[in-house]
Image: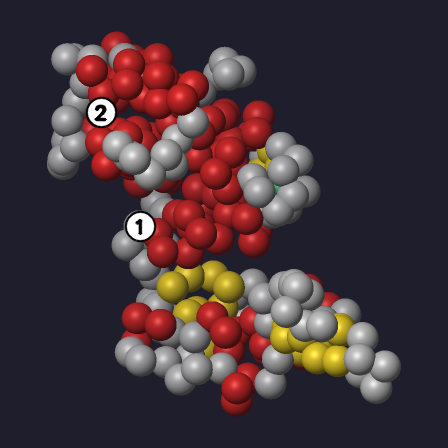
Amino acid sequence: PCLNHHCKKGKVCEVDEENTPMCVCQDPTTCPGAVGEFEHVCATDNTTYDSSCHFFAQKCSLEGTKKGHKLHLDYIGPCKFIEACMDAELNEFPLRMRDWLKNVLVTLYERDEENNLLTEKQKLRVRKIYENEKRLQAGEHSLDLLAHDFEKNYNMYIFPVHWQFGQLDQHPVDGFLSHTELAPLRAPLIPMEHCTTRFFEQCDADNDKYIALEEWANCFSIKERE
Ligand SMILES: [Ca+2]
Ligand SMILES: [Ca+2]
């Protein structure tokens, strides 16, 4: 009966006396051992967990408590000192992030000959970016150039920003990103980009712990609706 019974992260399925499947907190000792440091995760309580499995098992055991509610997976890798993000650096962050989102999408398009990761309609939109000769190629660019390109080729940045939001807004698809939905983008980025946390915090302009599509677009200075 457990085969088709889906449990969220941190829980496993067990059957009771009546053979009814139910989700219970996973015992962390049943998590596979971490192979290396790269599997460690750092949580918002600044504690390093062996793996995300260990973390979610712990979070589950705290379910219903204030502590458990506030506990989130912060980033991938063991906890480390992360430099404070200065105001000037925070302003630079969306420039690089936008460029990166655009390149992610173009790379996906290049590799997506048969995989169909993108719908036909999406492919059409990315093809326009891909085939644009004025496109800034992937690589390290000065902030001046990135800012200039954003001004000049604003249209190329709209779709990647909206597309990324759609990729993340899945559980549920409601036009809002929860902390958990944002994690796949945020968690691997934090150890590399020390402004990540501050950036996404300020994205949530009304401070309701969710990033709405409008807040997201604003964050990247994309004003138009899709
Ligand atoms: Ca959502
Ligand atoms: Ca919000």
Disc 1 marks which amino acid? Glu
Q: Is residue 102 above or below residue 82?
A: above
Q: Nearer the viewer, residue 57 or 48?
A: 57
Residue lying farthest to the bottom in this orientation: 29
Task: Give the image quadrant in which the ligand numbered 1 is located.
Answer: top right
Residue 207: assigned label: none
**80 left or right of 107?**
right
Q: Is residue 192 above or below residue 35?
A: above
Where's residue 52, x and y in %? 47, 70
Would residue 220 be visible to someone looking at this image? Answer: no
Q: Quadrant of residue 1?
A: bottom right
Q: Quadrant of residue 139?
A: top left
Residue 146: assigned label: 2
Classify 10 Å Cα crowding around label 2: few (below 14), some (14-19), many (20 and above).
Answer: some
The residue indicated by pointer 1 is 193
Where's residue 57, x and y in %? 59, 77
Residue lying farthest to the right in this orientation: 18
Q: Which residue is pictured at 51% across the width and 34% down the height? A: 166
Q: Is residue 62 above or below residue 86?
A: below
For label 2, the SS is helix
